[in-house]
Image: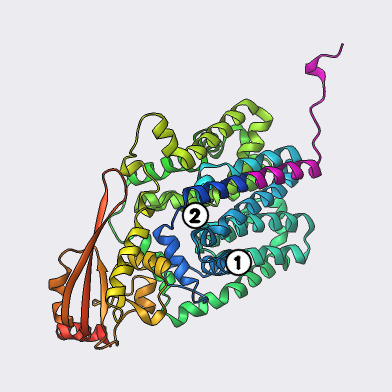
Amino acid sequence: MESTLSRPALVLSTRSALALLTLFLVGLTAYRLAVLLSLDLGLYGDEAYYFTWSWNPDWGYYSKPPMVAWLIAATTALAGNTAIGVKAASLVLYPATSLILFAVANRLYGPRTALVAGMAFATLPGIFFGSMVINTDVPLLFFWAAGLWFFLRALESGRYRHWLGVGAALGLGLLSKYTMVAFAASAALYLLAARPLRPHLARPGPYLAALTGFLLFLPNLLWNVGNGFISFLHTAEISQLDEALFHPDHLAAFLGAQFGVFGPVLMGVLAVLIAGRDGVYRREPERILLAFTVPLLAVIGLQSLLAEAHANWAAPIYLSGTILVVGWLLQRRPRLLAVGLAVNVLLGLSLYHYQDIARAMGVQEIPHRLDPRARIRGWDQLAAAVDRTRQRHPGARLLAADRFVLAELLFHLRPPPERYGFWNPGGDIDNHYALTTDIRGRWWADFLLVTGDAGAGKALAPYFEERRAVGTVTIRRSAEETDTYHFWILRGFRGYGAAGPGREKADR
């Protein structure tokens, strides 16, 4: 009788592996949609902010390129102006990104690794959370993955159509998030470092890709030229490199967050591989995957050390990093891989069902700092209170000085553009509403101000003929966190210059 140890391993064809992954992704997406529907989630502040961008499709916006707004415009046109409609692109593009990673991993390692890598990416804790949210990382990761696939094909074939694909992915990625520039840098560094591939740099292909990417990105560049390079300046400002340097605690927090986003086991293995374990820098395909992982992680890590960096700023490393870790572990430590995947799935499920889990453990209220949904609670209550107040004062235009407050109210109430505005007496352009909906010039108009500042009335006195407090509402975010908002009817706007000579410039 043949020993089980001598039996050949199950051979998985590309077609069957792709079919299995597709079924898995369809089921996972259906489950995520069901969770979204059952939770009846609203929008995070940034999501509502991007939603209002989508009302006026453009080539650029204050802080980001336009792709996220374009996606929301498309999905809400199909699925309606609901929270699900706003978030829908995440439910579609993340599975699509998994399928592209399957194609990349299949070329590098074969169908077995491709199947597991596609599943692993879809079940990363960061993707579990990201699939419930729309942000700029959704299209960025899709186009980064597409660029990686076209780059592999271009290196294999040298054909112009594949280099054009690289360029298209680069340009569309830049229209999604400026982080895509790191893709071009990684590709260039890899070609320079790999001696057998350097002849590509003497051929038209890479330059055709660069030109294609530039031409696709050019409209956003021209938009920035026409708006004082405002998106680029914002990107520079959030780096905070003009502040005190050297923050090892920020670096530790950033690296620790990667273990949460990528999963503790998989991130631990990735860290070992980045450190050079098993000679990974001396052989393919590990070397090309490291080329699209290490540079960006190093740059964002340095950023976190010198100032501060958010965990998702390194999000593209999860693409090549997933394939790298899965490929290495499948060959050497498959049981550890199984543990890592199981841990990630449990973490992801806990993100979706933490309230049910807490109640099952006898905890009825989640502390604010441990409640990821605290920031989206209560906006519907605020909007309902504002709507009731508007009905009592129908001539007053909606006004707010906080971009997230205004964004959430616009999502829930959807007044026409002439019926809302942004309060900005200082004249600083530090968000999209300050750029597009500042009320300067609307002399003698009446407004309904919604503010969290209890002392706003005194500060408003110079700007209006009449001001009157008309109510407050307190909304509950979590077990111990509430926010109180104050409503003011403001009549007869005198202009920002009414406060004195120092305001006249802002009023022009």
**Is 343 colored magenta in this rendering?**
no
Residue toward you, 448 or 319:
448
**Residue 283, horizontal then vertical, whole percent:** 68, 40
Examine the rendered structure and indicate whether residue 283 appears above or below residue 177. above
The dot on residue 133 is 2
At horizontal 44% and vertical 34% (from top left) the residue drawn is 357
**Is 6 colored magenta in this rendering?**
yes
Task: Give the magenta part as a residue range.
Answer: 1-27
Residue found farthest to the top = 1
**Residue 400, horizontal then vertical, whole percent:** 29, 71
At horizontal 23% and vertical 68% (from top left) the residue drawn is 487
**Residue 289, horizontal then vertical, whole percent:** 63, 46
Examine the rendered structure and indicate whether residue 134 appears above or below residue 283. below
Mark 2 vs mark 1, foreground winner is: 1
Residue 17 appears in the rendering: yes
At horizontal 60% and vertical 68% (from top left) the residue drawn is 171
The dot on residue 78 is 1
The dot on residue 111 is none
Total residue callouts: 2
Give amino acid for label 2.
Answer: Val
Secondary structure category for the residue under label 1:
helix
At horizontal 69% and vertical 31% (from top left) the residue drawn is 331
Whichever of labels 2 and 1 marks the residue nearer the N terminus, that label is 1
